[in-house]
Image (cartoon, rainbow, N blue to C red):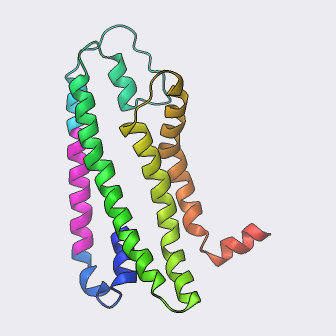
Amino acid sequence: MSYDRYLAICKPLHYNSIMNQSICIKSVIIIWLLSFKMTLVDSISLCSLYYCGPNIIHHFFCDYEPILELSCSDTSWLHIQTYVLGFICVVVPFILIVISYIYIVLAILKIKSITGRQKAFTTCSSHLTVVCIFYGTLIAVYLFPTKGQLDILNKVLSLFYTVMTPLLNPIIYTFRNKDFKKLLIK
């Protein structure tokens, strides 16, 4: 979506020739295949562990780190794998999104009219808000794992990116809707 906004704002005359149905379908297929592959790697890794002792997870759901804590096997290699895959799946896309928004902001600042700037900014602000909430909590949970006293914070952040982000997503995107604004004022 950030690439779409980048094209719409930074290269508006080329938008239709670059962002066509073929590119959209290829992008979705690539993203789905990569997501499936990364999930499969994690699942196979978890299945190869030996589990013994208590089977109680101190979390809201079966998240990756709490399942690792149940294992009696050496999980040090899985922690390294988590950081590498986390960097590839979370940090790299986040950096690409940030770079595209830097270009977008620079293009918006070049717009001479104030209404043009406002329109361009409101086009991107909803997506940027959702991205910051989602990636911020993901990075905090998976790339900076917490132990001991911060377990509650980890649970809250996990709950935030799994429940709150999808819940807030439609609300954030409807802030631009005039009917929603009128209803909110009432």
Q: Residue 138: horizontal and vertical position, in percent?
A: 42, 44
The single residue placed furthest to the top in the displayed view is 53
Where is residue 120 drawn, in percent x and y? 49, 81
- Quarter of the image with the N terminus is bottom left
Q: Which residues are magenta?
A: 23-40
Above or below — where is 73 with respect to 180? above
Taking the image as shown, residue 36 lies to the left or right of residue 117, namely left
Residue 175, quarter of the rendered image: bottom right
- Magenta span: helix, strand or loop, mainly? helix
Looking at the rendering, in which quadrant would you find the C terminus? Answer: bottom right
Q: Residue at x 48, y 26 (%)?
A: 59
Q: Can residue 147 be seen in the rendering of this structure? A: yes
Q: Which quadrant of the figure has residue 172?
A: bottom right
- Which of the pair 30/135 is nearer the observer? 135
Residue 48 in the image, given as x and y percentages of width and height: 19, 22
- Is residue 88 toward the left or the right of residue 70 in the image? left
Q: Residue at x 36, y 39 (%)?
A: 143
Q: Is residue 123 magenta?
A: no
The verdict on residue 29 being magenta is: yes
**Residue at 36 percent of width and 76 percent of height:** 6
